[in-house]
Image (spheres, rainbow, N blue to C red):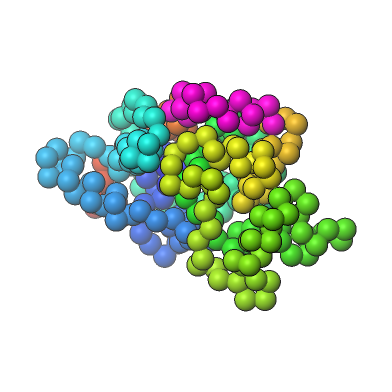
Amino acid sequence: MQFHDCFVEGCDASALLDGNDTEKTAPINSNLIGYEVVDAAKEAVEAVCPGVVSCSDILAYAARDSTVKLNGTGWAVQGGRKDGLFSCAEAAELELSPPTFNVAQLIESFARRGLSKKQMVILSGSHTVGVGHCDKFVERLYNFSETHFTDPSINASYAEQLKTDCPQATFNTTLEIFMDTITPGEFDANYYKGLSEHKGLFTSDQSLFDDRRTRKLVKKLMSERVFDRQFGEAMRAMGAVVVRAEGQIRRNCRTVNPW
């Protein structure tokens, strides 16, 4: 969720705001969950230190703590962010990287936020946990191109499994497919091993191994030690994208303060 927030107008908790045309309503954010967890954390913090910890900072701490809870390695989180006053669905659609992006598009997208190619590949490792939905990758399974019915970059047996889960005529858009086929409940480096086996769920995943510009990075990150050390550093860099000097500390993460 922090990625979806920081990549749209910076790390300002705009992704948490309710409304008819906020980032939360954008199709690219339709499968985001966990808002109630943020609400609970904010309520607990406000009860002890009212008006001190921003919703944007809570997102940063939550990203770190959820990683640790899933047996990943934590990192030092820098606080002091302010919450923004505006949120726009169109901005989310324009700024967030869709699952159809290739490496060139991903590099350009991350570079606009001051993040490197290496940081992009490392941050993609967050897909070691979480799920995707059929409508986000079904074009890889059916009528892929004039020469290939199915995306040839997908492991053949994995493709057949996905076709069973997502039949061409009537696939279930709410069905959850793990993005890491090896250890989906653990925050580890097996996401990258899956890419080496051509079991990346999204185009944006598998292209990291298939493209020569990023393949060496993927191979290095298959080492648990390397991934553990570098993921936190990349998250700290992402958490510093366009940090606002002005703004507010919301009392409720879903709405701006009236004053």
Among all residues in the image, which is located at the extreme bottom? 170
Which quadrant would residue 114 be assigned to in this image?
Answer: top right
* Lateral position of residue 253 relative to residue 20, left or right: left
The extreme left residue here reads 48
Q: Looking at the picture, how far across and down is residue 67, in whole percent?
A: 38, 38
Of all residues, the one furthest to the right in this rendering is 147
Residue 248 in view here: no
Closer to us: 29 or 213: 213
Q: Tell me if 123 is positioned left or right of 139 in this view.
A: left
Residue 54 percent across, percent down from the top left: 27, 39
Relative to the observer, which residue lies in front, 105 or 230?
A: 230
Magenta stretch: helix, strand or loop mostly: helix
Instruction: Name the residue at 44% across, 39% down.
Output: 187
Give left or right: position of 60 versus 230: left
Depicted 67 relative to depicted 144: above or below: above
Can you give x and y, in whole percent of width and height, for residue 145 in the image? 82, 59
**Residue 32 place in picture, x, y as percent:** 44, 55
Q: Note whether 147 is above or below 242 in the view shown.
A: below
- The residue lying at 64 percent from left, 48 percent from top is 199
Residue depicted at 35% across the width and 53% down the height? 34
Q: Quadrant of residue 190?
A: top right
Q: Which residues are magenta?
A: 215-232
User: Who's the residue at 75% across and 31% down the image?
Assistant: 212
Q: Quadrant of residue 141?
A: bottom right
Asked if residue 229 can be seen in this view, the reply is yes
From the viewer's side, name the closer residue of 156 and 12: 156
